[in-house]
Image (cartoon, rainbow, N blue to C red):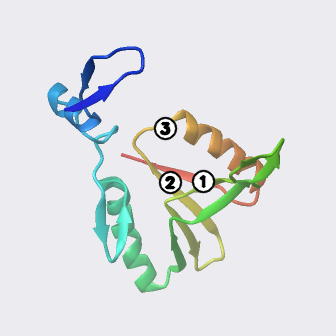
Amino acid sequence: MRKRHTKSSKHQQEHLTANEFRRYNGLSKRKYNNHKIEIDGFTFDSKLEADFYQRLKPLVKTGKIKELKIHPRYLLQEGFTKNGKHYQPIYYIADFEVLYDDGVTVIYDTKGMRTEVYKIKRKLFEYKYQDKTIVEVDK
């Protein structure tokens, strides 16, 4: 428990930290109940993503997949400065980019929950990278 002084009051107020609040209310730390998993030195955000990686690995060994990129980054909007304020670039980070032996490239994204941010970034991706397609992998 933290004690905080306020300017308007001579009395100290006690506040719960975020972790204390979660424990007190029985809430988990992760918003969507997923757990990070490490395989082959890569960290995956969910079991679904790690399982999909395990399904892709044999295809790399047999040569059906020529190239496998994990967490590839795609620029959606350049960073810029306006009225003296700098705005960071916006990226979409997919789960996997797969180049198959027939030359076809597919972007895979494992999804348990489609957030509003994801929906907007996907739309921007589809507009900017019209030669690439995102395939969503569901539970």
Kindly identify the amino acid type of the residue bearing the numbered disc 1. Ile
Q: Is mark 1 on a helix, strand or loop?
A: strand
Which label's residue is closer to the chain start, 2 or 1? 2
The residue nearer to you, when weighing 10 against 48, is 10
Mark 1 against mark 3, which lies toward the viewer?
3
Which label's residue is closer to the chain start, 3 or 2? 2
The residue nearer to you, when weighing 87 against 120, is 87
Kindly identify the amino acid type of the residue bearing the numbered disc 2. Asp
Kindly report the distance in space between the C-alpha atoms of the residues bearing marks 3 and 2.
11 Å
Residue positioned most to the front = 10
Residue 1, image x, y percentages: 19, 32
Q: Is mark 2 on a helix, strand or loop?
A: strand
Residue identifier under label 3 = 114
Q: Residue at x 51, y 64 (%)?
A: 71
Q: Quadrant of residue 93?
A: bottom right
Residue identifier under label 1 = 134
Q: Residue at x 56, y 42 (%)?
A: 118
Q: Is residue 37 left or right of residue 131?
A: left
Tell me whether the residue at label 3 lies in contact with that at label 2, contact meaning CB atoms closer than 8 angstroms: no
Residue 111 — which label?
none
Residue identifier under label 2 = 109
The residue nearer to you, when weighing 51 against 35, is 35
Residue 48, image x, y percentages: 34, 54
Q: Residues within 10 Å of mark 3 (few under 14, many from 20)?
A: few
Tell me whether the residue at label 1 lies in contact with that at label 3, contact meaning CB atoms closer than 8 angstroms: no
Q: In this view, does 91 lie to the left or right of 2?
A: right
Kindly identify the amino acid type of the residue bearing the numbered disc 3. Arg
Q: What element carries label 3?
A: loop
Q: In this view, does 109 lie to the left or right of 44?
A: right
Tell me whether the residue at label 2 lies in contact with that at label 1, contact meaning CB atoms closer than 8 angstroms: yes
